[in-house]
Amino acid sequence: MGYHKWKSCIDACLQCAAVCNHCANSCTQEDDVKMMAKCIQLDMECATICYSAAQLMSMGSQQAAQICAICEEICEACGNECGKHDTEHCKECSRICMLCAEECRKMAA
């Protein structure tokens, strides 16, 4: 039941996790990696919670709404941090994180 009911949120979380992983990896290739440290950390946290949220929703977990509320917060934090950087990968990550946060907000409501 959970998978079909929450498919749009699951898809958003999986996409967000993939983009966050890409962003974190890309940030390690920037000239000033130290400046990107917070971005990299939030990318990794966001990818982790997004994968977890997607897994729990696909299993129909009774805790899915609570996990999605946390996922929303981390996605917003990651999106805000990535939005501070002027790289294509950070811009894309910021946009996808904000979309995921919106899906998680709807799911957790």
Image (cartoon, rainbow, N blue to C red):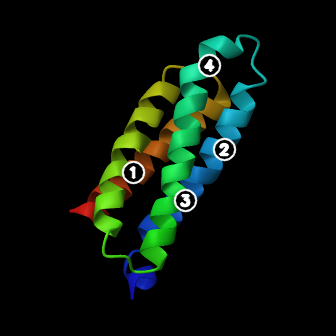
Q: Mark 3 sits on what residue?
A: 51
Q: Mark 1 sits on what residue?
A: 71
Q: Position of residue 57 (x, y in %)?
A: 42, 72
Q: Mark 2 sits on what residue?
A: 21
Quadrant in which the N terminus appears: bottom left
Please report the residue visible at 64 percent of the width from the left and 52 percent of the height from the top.
Answer: 18
Amino acid found under the numbered disc labelled 4: Met
Give the Cα distance between marks 4 and 2.
Answer: 14 Å
Q: If you read the primary sequence from the N terminus, does the residue marked by circle 4 or circle 1 appear first?
A: 4
Q: Position of residue 69 (x, y in %)?
A: 30, 54
Q: Mark 4 sits on what residue?
A: 36
Q: Is residue 8 above or below residue 60?
A: above
Q: Is residue 26 above or below residue 57?
A: above
Give the Cα distance between marks 1 and 2.
Answer: 15 Å
Determine crowd level at label 4: few under 14, some 14-19, many 20+ residues with C-alpha closer than 10 A.
some
Give the Cα distance between marks 1 and 3.
Answer: 10 Å
Give the Cα distance between marks 3 and 2.
Answer: 11 Å
Q: If you read the primary sequence from the N terminus, does the residue marked by circle 3 or circle 2 appear first?
A: 2
Q: Helix, strand or loop at disc 1?
A: helix
Q: If you read the primary sequence from the N terminus, does the residue marked by circle 4 or circle 3 appear first?
A: 4
Determine crowd level at label 1: few under 14, some 14-19, many 20+ residues with C-alpha closer than 10 A.
many
